[in-house]
Image (cartoon, coloured by chain):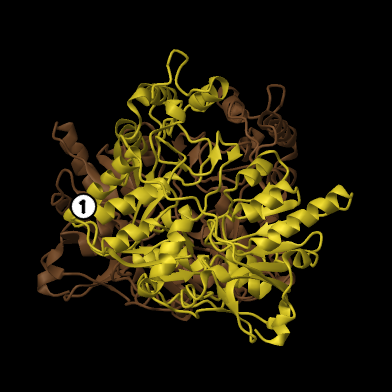
Chain colours: A yellow, B brown
Amino acid sequence: MTDSLQCKVMSAEEAATLIQNGELIGVSGFTLAGYPKEVPKALAERGKALREAGVDFKVSLFSGASTGDECDGNLARAGILDWRMPYQSNPSLRKAINDGSVRYLDAHLGCMGPMVRSGALPHPTLAIIEAVAVTPDGRVYLSSSGGNSATYLALADKIILEINSLYGDAFLGFHDTFVPALAPFAKPIPILSAGDRVGEEFVRVDPSKIIAIVHTDRADSVNSFSEPDPTSKIIAGQILEFLHHERKKGRLPEGLPYQSGVGNVANAVLCAMANDPLQGCISLYTEVIQEAVFTLLEAEKLKGASGTALTFSTAAQKLFKTNVNSWKKRFVLRQQEVSNSPEVIRRLGIISMNTALECDIYGNVNSSHVSGMSIMNGIGGSADFARNCALGFFMTPSTAKNGAISAIVPLVSHVDHTDHDTMIFVTEQGLADLRGLDPITRAHAIIDHCAHPHYRHLLNESLNFSLRFSKGKHLPLSLEQVFDMHLRFMKTGNMAEDNFETFI
Amino acid sequence: MTDSLQCKVMSAEEAATLIQNGELIGVSGFTLAGYPKEVPKALAERGKALREAGVDFKVSLFSGASTGDECDGNLARAGILDWRMPYQSNPSLRKAINDGSVRYLDAHLGCMGPMVRSGALPHPTLAIIEAVAVTPDGRVYLSSSGGNSATYLALADKIILEINSLYGDAFLGFHDTFVPALAPFAKPIPILSAGDRVGEEFVRVDPSKIIAIVHTDRADSVNSFSEPDPTSKIIAGQILEFLHHERKKGRLPEGLPYQSGVGNVANAVLCAMANDPLQGCISLYTEVIQEAVFTLLEAEKLKGASGTALTFSTAAQKLFKTNVNSWKKRFVLRQQEVSNSPEVIRRLGIISMNTALECDIYGNVNSSHVSGMSIMNGIGGSADFARNCALGFFMTPSTAKNGAISAIVPLVSHVDHTDHDTMIFVTEQGLADLRGLDPITRAHAIIDHCAHPHYRHLLNESLNFSLRFSKGKHLPLSLEQVFDMHLRFMKTGNMAEDNFETFI
């Protein structure tokens, strides 16, 4: 670092004083990877103190996706967040959104960058980005996520960098920063296979925009990886069996890359692949690279992994650092509009696996809103993949809350994915291949194969009521009773009828 | 035509005898353009006679999109249709779907071709395709639509061609047949501007698969173009005003191509552009080229038009034939997976305008199902464009059936487009720009700007009820009362309360 940058080094508290009321801040970070940790914490403290002193102080936050508690949690608890996009998963922030104190807008993660650049969304005034290094001529080497960092760095007038020394040189050479031009200047994104590198290893910024550099060695605070539970293992087994079946039928070519959503079920599928003797070496073209890749690496089944975030627990981060030089060439981290690009997902023929919150008997999926009202996290990148993949799975255990909630319902209380965009539903009960099925056939397939047996009679009762009510119409639906299971849950805490005991 | 093809020439009735019970037929045709007319009619008569004689006879039908009454109407009335995909607009067929006698599956029009080729949907056993010419070595020159004809011709074992002499040489040189390879062999679709030609002017087939050639001179039966009504003109005016506003704000570059849905409102917008002195020359990269292009051509405002169908009334067909040589170079007809390609739509930065059946206060759109049950036509290509465009409008008059139906509702009874995929709502009442708005702000914007004043109090009442019920949750929604307006309509024929007179 030269003098010109050296003189920008300061404490997080000093950096926080450079942030004004009303700023729109674009931060790095995607699924708890590579988010700024020090300045948001100091900003929360400063903002809280100002507000307690009666001074107006609020900021808005654009990110890649979810950030850690140091960022989203602190800002939410300080009460200084006004507007937040496009994704979060923090309990304090979720609470603030669901008590109406933070305005939140859930958006496709692959669309956020272009919408900000085009002006459809406002430009951030300030970028706070975690990096592992910066050069005097303004090359910023990002840390464990790509996110929308290149866009925020390009558009913001002011930049605060958090240089994280924890990673050492581990992330140098990891990133492939390519930001597609907008129409009318857009060209094809030149990615033809999952591992293709088409950009630079760093983000170029105007060094004069850097107003502060803060040093840290704080790790991403990612929860430890839990071993797949029995339900997840059954779901994973069914997906693998189906993939073999499709290959045998000639409907699935070898070598298509996988996208795997976040969470235990998704991890279980990758682990099952590592252990399946019929499964060859795979590529991932995904959003979040979770630590199940280690299992694949150990089994010598990982050809390569492309994503926008490396979401590893502290233990996995250590393992990764130890082996980074031998593994590095198999990983590439992209900006999220490229990891989630509809163009590339369609071209590569991705096999997509995402988790559903609830699925209805017509094929619609709710990924985000409990009882249609309370946001959990958001749609994330699930629709970028589900809408454009070659083969798509939505996975969920058939029940939640010890059986009080059926994940299969007559009509989802919130639609994130319409029946046009869903192909295969999988629960631990079974798998329903919905491709080519009309609504009534689809309803029977989902009830018979995916619903928990305890809920099948209620779902059939609802379907039969709708069939009578709608007198053969294309989509049998009785608006009057279609949410009865949801309403019963809200009243009694159980979707099943009163005389049903919680059965698990 | 050489002897080898000449000997395949026969009457439609003879050709129909070559069709077996249980066939899956892939037909040409998109939005009443370029569909087979003679053989389906003869097939319907044959099938009906067989069924009346107690012989099982049913066929399934894949198309581009909607076909004319000669095809969809006759087959539906004969009662010989089993399964139908991916779109229709015929009254007899609609009735058959909504009385449960035809299994119908509504799908994204841009996805149908690849799904059939990949085997996600079955391959047609027979293709019946309208063409203007065929050569001995199997070059088939399509007529007024591209649709999925190249896919069906490639996959079906048997081909029946209807050679339509009405068009003369008019359509030679019109088509650009490019069928993208599937993964893992897919490459970027090399279209960089709306008029780019990247394929061949014909479809190559194996001539030995041609089992019949039927001659016809029957025209596409497209309704006459109606002059824009006052409501459509107001909607069009608002869209133009908004486009100017966005350009002035620097959020909309010059020269982005337009997609315009089917129908009077869409036609009105193009006519308004022709008459707007502030509007320069435009390109269309659309699905259906409707006759509003003539108004643009006359005003010297059409740079070029790319689509998959030329849907012209008989009068417009004549006008077109007369001027075809001077206009030809400005038109290109593609296969529908290219006209509707997410990759190309995103790259070109399309401005998309589609009609909604109903919109809800959260930003979801229903394009297809009345009261959530009865299919009208289908989603068509609206989601191919809405999901991938640079700027997207959903347009609808604020009321239907003389005011008995509000097009703005508390929750749509069927979701075709989720709030993540909608940007601007426009009715004759006004325009709501939903980009970046959280659910509650969005609800107020839609009620205040788009709803008819007679329905605003009901919508606000519903929103307020939901706000109280959901106690500040991210998305205020009361599942118990959210369909009250729909239910009242089903009971009383009016969405408004009993003491409301039909007000228009």
Q: Is residue B401 above or below residue A331?
A: above
* Residue B126 seen from this side: yes
Q: Residue at x 21, y 52 (%)?
A: A244
Residue B343 spot, x, y in % from top left: 45, 67
Task: From the viewer's side, name the closer residue of A415 and B77.
Answer: A415
Local crowd size for mark 1, using a 10 Å CA cut-off: few (<14), some (14–19), many (≥20): some
> Of helix, strand and loop, which one carries label 1?
helix
* For residue A238, side relative to residue B420 (left or right): left
**Quadrant location, the C terminus of chain A:** top left
Q: Nearer the viewer, residue B49 or A343?
A: A343
Check disc 1 and report the residue beneath it.
A244
The reply, left or right, for residue A132 in relation to residue A52 is: left
Q: Is residue B216 visible?
A: no
Q: Residue furthest right?
A: A54
Chain assignment, label 1: A
Percent x, y for residue A64? 57, 61
Looking at the image, residue A128 lies above or below residue A502: below
